[in-house]
Image: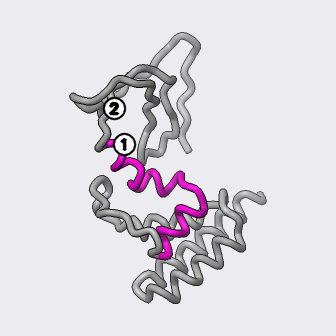
Amino acid sequence: MFSPKLRPDHFLVIAGYQPKEGKTQKVRFSFYGQTIDRSSNLGTGIVNAKDIETAAHDAMAIKTGSFKFVSAVALGVKVLADNNLDHNMSLQRVAVLTLSSTRFDTEKSQKVLLQVAKKFPKLQRIANMATLLRADAEKRDKQ
């Protein structure tokens, strides 16, 4: 992942989203769906209750969620609303691919991916792909 280095006392200004209406509270801004993995310092910002609810069930919530949450979405136990932010992929597919992450236990992930492949024939190919991605990631981690 690309990580730019900033010299001390230098800043990077990037345009982002903040609602026009809401309440003021402490926030942190993060890059989303980018090759750069950075977050801002904690500061004051405006938040909207609807945005908070949406964010609790979007692709980023899945990609950073707990194994329990990701597995529930992958297995269709927790059915989320339509993917309004990343509408080109279903949130269930995002969850299946997230199970390829090495941050989860291999055996537990494999078990869930096998269940997904059995329970959802249309997701069998993507579950198999997640298994292969997981194996590749583990090989890279060992090198």
Res. 47 mark: 2
Where residue 52 is drawn, which disc sits there? Answer: 1
| Dots 2, 1 in contact, CB < 8 A | yes
Residue type pointed to by label 2: Val
Q: Secondary structure at mark 2?
A: strand
* Res. 69 mark: none
The residues tagged by marks 2 and 1 sit, at their Cα atoms, a distance apart of: 7 Å
Residue farthest to the right?
142
- Mark closer to the chain start, 2 or 1: 2
User: Looking at this view, is 106 or 66 the one in front?
Assistant: 66
**Circle 2 crowding by C-alpha within 10 Å: few under 14, some 14–19, many from 20:** some
Position of residue 97 measured from the top left corner of the image (x, y, whole percent): 51, 67
Q: How is the image coloured?
A: one colour
Seen at 59% across and 83% down, the residue is 114
Type of the residue with mark 1: Ile
40 magenta-colored? no
Residue bounds of the magenta highlight = 51-75
**Residue 16, placed above or below residue 133:** above
**Figure disc tally:** 2
Question: Between residues 139 and 32, which one lies in front from this camera angle?
Answer: 32
Does the magenta stretch mainly form a helix, a strand or a loop?
helix
Residue beneath the point at 43% across and 32% down? 29
Residue 109 placed where, x, y %?
Answer: 64, 71
At 41% from the left edge and 56% from the top edge, which residue is drawn? 59
Q: Residue at x 39, y 69 (%)?
A: 79
Q: Residues within 10 Å of mark 1 (few under 14, many from 20)?
A: few
Instruction: Point out residue 16 in the picture as x, y percentages from the top left corner.
Output: 32, 32
Quadrant including the C terminus: bottom right
